[in-house]
Amino acid sequence: MRTQVGIVGAGPAGLFLAHLLHLTGIEAVIVEAKSRRYVEERIRAGVLEQGVRDLLVETGIGERMKLEGLLHHGINLRFGGEKRRIDFSDLADGQAVTVYSQHEVVKDLVAARIGAGGTIIFEAEDVRADGFEGQHPVIRFTAGGERHELFCDYIAGCDGSHGICRSSIPEGALTSFERVYPFAWLGILARAAPASEELIYAQHERGFALLSMRSPTISRLYVQVDPHEDLANWPDDRIWEELQIRLGGGTGWQLTEGPVLQKGITAMRSFVTEPMQYGRLFLAGDAAHIVPPTGAKGMNLAIADVRVLARALQSFYETGRTDRLEAYSATCLRRIWKVQRFSWWMTSMLHHFPEHTPFDHRRQLAELDYVTSSRVGGATLAENYVGLPFDDP
Ligand code: APR
Ligand code: PHB
């Protein structure tokens, strides 16, 4: 088998890359370890930046998102017994975010690929990639009981944080930067109307909590827990009780409760690997970096990476020039580090850290007071939350 660009992983990064390449006439094959159903039902993030929304619309896959996605013009920060709003319309030039599940984006992208006659090999086993230093890197995998070799001009490693691409790069070629946070998020999906029209990020002495949503009838809620917490210690009643206290305690405002459809614990870390390229292998999305979810940036960063990669590949196939490919990593990393900073900052401002002293607690409250009362403070949060420009130098 042969293709121009071999893509490992059918998450948002791999699928959107294949879509962008298809629009410029470049052929790609995606090799994915899981089934179509699995990737289409995997519950992940749910907030799209303004620029990502625009990109989905411009590239012809935004129809369902425009209908079903919820446009949000602000978020709420709750702290010290008060709830204050960050107004994006006012503070970020009328931009907004769209609440639309990652797995819905994935469904739209898979349908577009298959509709356009593109190839996605699902349930590939024992996937390997090598030959990055030569002219024709190869993806090897087993499908239908047979071993296959897919020869490519370039390989895109879009296989997430536990994929095989990053670990196929020789040791010593990459440098990693990491921060592990001393807490995790316990998240639930519940059949309950969201009790607020917009998201609520709550700082509370018992720990952080977040009210988010997937639709007018489905709530997505999180509470900060110990990183080693066992789900068995959190029956539904305990989760609701903790959410009620952290999100509304003492105000008379009540969260709408309902059956819990899904429950899970997510570890929190910041991670970046540099460079995002080794020979003819390019890493994109979670394969290259992880952000803690407090800034709602994971999927948005993945889309921003592959936008840069698709343009660089287009430049190569149209003109033979490799300068944009060579600049891929540096171009992406400038934006990635700013988004890392924002995600770390939101995380630090809103969570209870075990080492916190009463001084730190007061400092957090002062910071929240500042960003919700100063125009400049609010604007810095708003402009990052709705998404920095893609081509920020
Ligand atoms: N071979 C083939 N596919 C693989 C392999 C492998 N060895 N290992 C992992 N994969 C697949 C996974 O099954 C998954 O479908 O790669 C895909 C990676 O997708 P994501 O993890 O969704 O990563 P990415 O596309 O970079 O999107 C980033 O996902 O984790 C969230 O919050 C994160 O929103 C962010 C987004
Ligand atoms: C979500 O809806 O899952 C969500 C929203 C905002 C975040 C993180 C997760 O910051």
Image (tube, helix red, strand yellow):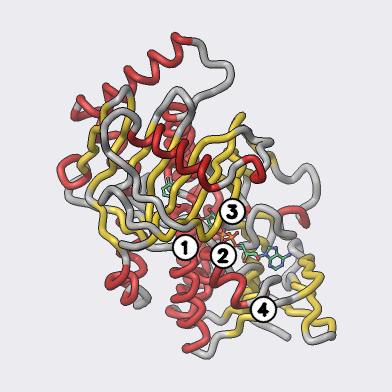
Whole-angstrom CA distance, mark 4 to mark 2, is: 15 Å
Whole-angstrom CA distance, mark 3 to mark 2, is: 15 Å
Q: Is mark 4 within 8 Å of ligand 1?
A: no
Q: Which mark is residue 286?
A: 3
Q: Quadrant of the C terminus?
A: top left
SS assignment at label 1:
helix
Coordinates of residue 137 in the picture (x, y in percent): 74, 70
Badge 1 amino acid: Gln
Whole-angstrom CA distance, mark 3 to mark 4, is: 19 Å
Label pair 1/2, CB-CB below 8 angstroms: yes
Q: Does residue 60 appear left or right of residue 205 in this picture? A: left
Whole-angstrom CA distance, mark 1 to mark 2, is: 8 Å
Residue named by callout 1:
102
Q: Do we see residue 176 in this rendering?
A: yes
SS assignment at label 3:
helix
Q: Does residue 71 appear left or right of residue 212 in this picture? A: left
Q: Is mark 3 within 8 Å of ligand 1?
A: yes
Instruction: Say which label, 3 or 2, has the lower sequence index.
Output: 2
Q: Which mark is residue 178?
A: none
